[in-house]
Image (cartoon, rainbow, N blue to C red):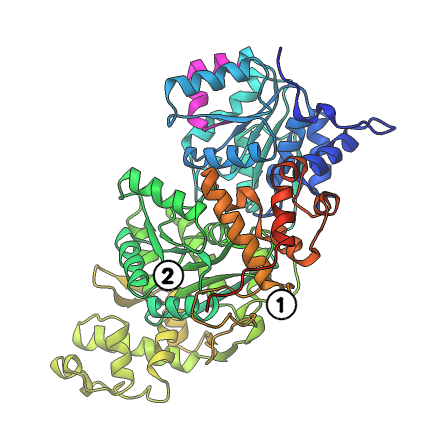
């Protein structure tokens, strides 16, 4: 006889409504007292059999929007998830809650797959995770038709957008789900979608008749900061040592070589860092990802091949050492920080060569001219975010069609930059390009142009007799850093262009208007001191101990540390990531409230029935036991 759904024993309320049953499941299984934002509305709609398209930020609780309906409705919820490497952790987290979850993918042995298939057919699962490519296998479709399906959840639905940043061809076939199972509700979810991507998801997944839920894209706990690039690895190391000592984080680099060099650089300087990119042996890649998820305080240095579906809640920072290709990609990647709602940092180092590199990549990309124009528009939007003098969050949210007020928690709010009339500086820079090309038949990059403007008699200036040019020394009023900023912004504004493999600069169609005085040029003045949020002081002693979490008094830090140590040991024993046991936010609340009974512990957010039964006595015993006296 098949086992009942987890929700079957939830007590009915007087009206017997599905929403009441959903709330019972939320409290009993997941340990939360109330839904957040639009979660309850989504859950009720899907429980009632409706299709839904959900746009909700990372950390906003998207998974509950399909997990709870799957537990309330009859049958098995089938979840389409893009990364098989993460399915085991997703299933482990659900099993720790007492949910009957399983997955099918190529990493399993034949016996393991057959066991899960038998459980599915017998109705002994609540949730089954599948990679999208498995639905192209006829045997998988036959298996699904043998069981009762409560819903289909299509996670990371932006992967269906053909010109999006995470396009997955297998997602294009998912519209067939409605053809095979027209009565089964579908819920597609993503944390990243512009209006264009939203429309493409709707079209490709045949969700025109679905109800669309669009939550705020704001992640107020993330502090967005973009710094002028100046020895970026040193800048990164400074960030880690001064603000994120001992924290888990992700560092994104554009190339595999940069990943390897940056990871080695950090390790040599005492930061525990691991590399991740597609060129690594698959075993090494899998092992590094597993370590990052299961251990605390590791830094993952990666290309954008890493991150989608990562459910680690305590990533305290995401750093970019190269310019992302789009605002969507940037938002998706930075969104991996602070899923637990605690303060986190999104930091990007950005410079002239980033613009050069992105422009060259577009020129050499596959696809037609329309495709290149789309790529260029993505980069231009990213450049506008980097060069804005307004609130970063306002501009970021505006990109996704959401209006907002200045946040007070980004670098441009904390240390406001100013804009200045850079028309004369732009004319001097462009005039130098003109003089070199017309008088000498030469093309040079930004460094040589800067040296000429500043009147520097470098070996290269003397070699080419550039000190004889009429523009030599006319820009001595600006520093080298300021001229670098001018060059970067002229390139970003398409008032100068890059040509050839050596990155030489040439004029554009718009340059003449500036040189002729018909167009003024407003430029951003980089603040002298980079913005930095006020952070709690680090513990002394050089042990790498972290500061107390937000709103946890410093005197409770030893209790929090003991709880984290217990969690780490428990997770290691069970072979699961630490967050599968409890999130930091739950441990913080336990430390703050100091429960003495199981009933008091049960009232802590994130402590459901199964976790209370599994860990409750251990936690109470830990809290009741005085800490050991330090040796000596």
> In percent of the image, x 35 and y 50: which residue is there?
303
The crowding category of the residue bearing disc 2, from other C-alpha atoms within 10 Å (few below 14, some 14 to 19, many at least 20), is many
Q: Secondary structure at mark 1?
A: helix
Label 2 element class = loop
Q: Nearer the viewer, residue 310 or 547?
A: 547
- The residue to which callout 1 is attached is 555
Mark sitting earlier along the chain (1/2): 2
Look at the picture and state if 171 lies above or below 509: above
- For residue 406, side relative to residue 229 (left or right): right
Q: Is residue 407 visible?
A: no
Q: Which residue is mark 2?
A: 321
Residue toward you, 581 or 132: 581
Query: Would you identify the image quadrant in which residue 164 lies?
Result: top left
Specify the quadrant of the image occupied by residue 556. bottom right
Can you see residue 47? yes
Q: Which residues are magenta?
A: 128-144
* Residue 142 lies in the magenta stretch: yes
**Magenta span contains residue 554:** no
| 462 left or right of 317 in image | left
Residue furthest to the front: 632
Side of 557 where 498 appears, left or right = left
Instruction: Identify the residue shown where x is 62% and y is 32%.
Output: 67
Q: CA distance from mark 1 to mark 2?
A: 37 Å
Going 61% across and 35% down the picture, which residue do you hit? Answer: 97
Q: Position of residue 355 (x, y in %)?
A: 35, 62
Main SS of the magenta segment?
A: helix
């Amino acid at each position: 006889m098949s086992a009942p759904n987890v929700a079957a024993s939830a007590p009915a309320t007087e009206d017997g409504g599905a929403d009441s049953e959903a709330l019972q499941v939320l409290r009993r299984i997941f340990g939360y007292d109330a839904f957040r934002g639009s979660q309850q509305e989504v859950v009720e709609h899907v429980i009632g059999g409706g299709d839904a398209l959900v746009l909700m930020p990372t950390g906003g609780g998207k998974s509950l929007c399909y997990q709870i309906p799957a537990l309330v409705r009859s049958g098995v919820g089938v979840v389409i998830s893009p990364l098989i490497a993460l399915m085991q952790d997703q299933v482990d987290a659900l099993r720790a809650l007492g949910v009957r979850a399983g997955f099918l993918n190529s990493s399993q042995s034949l016996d393991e797959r057959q066991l899960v298939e038998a459980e599915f057919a017998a109705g002994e699962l609540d949730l089954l995770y599948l990679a999208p490519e498995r639905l192209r296998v006829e045997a998988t479709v036959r298996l699904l038709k043998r069981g009762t399906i409560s819903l289909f959840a299509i996670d990371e639905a932006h992967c269906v957008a053909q010109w999006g940043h995470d396009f997955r061809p297998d997602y294009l076939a998912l519209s067939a789900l409605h053809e095979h199972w027209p009565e089964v509700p579908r819920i597609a979810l993503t944390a990243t979608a512009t209006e264009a991507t939203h429309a493409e998801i709707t079209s490709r997944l045949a969700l025109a008749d679905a109800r669309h839920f669009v939550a705020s894209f704001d992640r107020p706990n993330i502090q967005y900061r973009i710094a002028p690039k100046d020895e970026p690895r040193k800048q990164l190391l400074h960030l880690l040592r001064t603000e994120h000592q001992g924290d888990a984080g992700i560092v994104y680099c554009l190339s595999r070589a940069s990943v390897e060099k940056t990871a080695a650089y950090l390790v040599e300087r005492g930061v525990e860092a691991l590399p991740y990119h597609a060129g690594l042996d698959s075993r090494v890649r899998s092992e590094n990802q597993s370590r990052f998820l299961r251990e605390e305080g590791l830094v993952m240095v990666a290309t954008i091949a890493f991150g989608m579906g990562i459910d680690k809640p305590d990533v305290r920072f995401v750093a970019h050492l190269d310019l992302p290709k789009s605002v969507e990609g940037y938002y998706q990647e930075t969104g991996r920080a602070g899923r637990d709602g605690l303060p986190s940092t999104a930091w990007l180092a950005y410079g002239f060569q980033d613009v050069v590199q992105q422009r060259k990549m577009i020129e050499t990309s596959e696809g037609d001219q329309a495709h290149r124009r789309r790529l260029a528009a993505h980069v231009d939007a990213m450049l506008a975010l980097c060069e804005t003098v307004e609130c970063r969050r306002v501009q970021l949210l505006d990109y996704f069609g959401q209006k907002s007020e200045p946040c007070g928690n980004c670098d441009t709010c904390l240390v406001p930059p100013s804009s200045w009339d850079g028309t004369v500086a732009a004319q001097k820079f462009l005039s130098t390009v003109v003089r070199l090309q017309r008088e000498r038949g030469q093309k040079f990059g930004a460094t040589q142009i800067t040296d000429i403007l500043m009147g520097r008699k470098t070996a290269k200036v003397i070699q080419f007799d550039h000190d004889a040019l009429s523009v030599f020394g006319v820009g001595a009023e600006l520093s080298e850093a300021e001229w670098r900023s001018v060059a970067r912004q002229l390139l970003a504004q398409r008032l100068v262009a890059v040509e050839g493999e050596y990155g030489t600069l040439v004029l554009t169609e718009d340059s003449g208007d500036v040189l002729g005085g018909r167009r003024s040029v407003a430029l951003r003045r980089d603040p002298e001191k980079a913005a930095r949020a006020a952070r709690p002081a680090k513990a002394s002693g050089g042990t790498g101990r972290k500061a107390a979490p937000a709103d946890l008094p410093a005197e409770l830090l030893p209790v929090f540390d003991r709880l984290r140590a217990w969690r780490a040991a428990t997770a290691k024993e069970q072979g699961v990531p630490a967050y599968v046991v409890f999130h930091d936010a739950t441990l913080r609340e336990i430390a703050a409230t100091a429960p003495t009974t199981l009933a008091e512990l049960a009232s802590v957010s994130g402590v459901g029935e199964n976790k209370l039964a599994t860990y409750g006595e251990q936690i109470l015993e830990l809290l009741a036991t005085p800490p050991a006296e330090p040796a000596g």
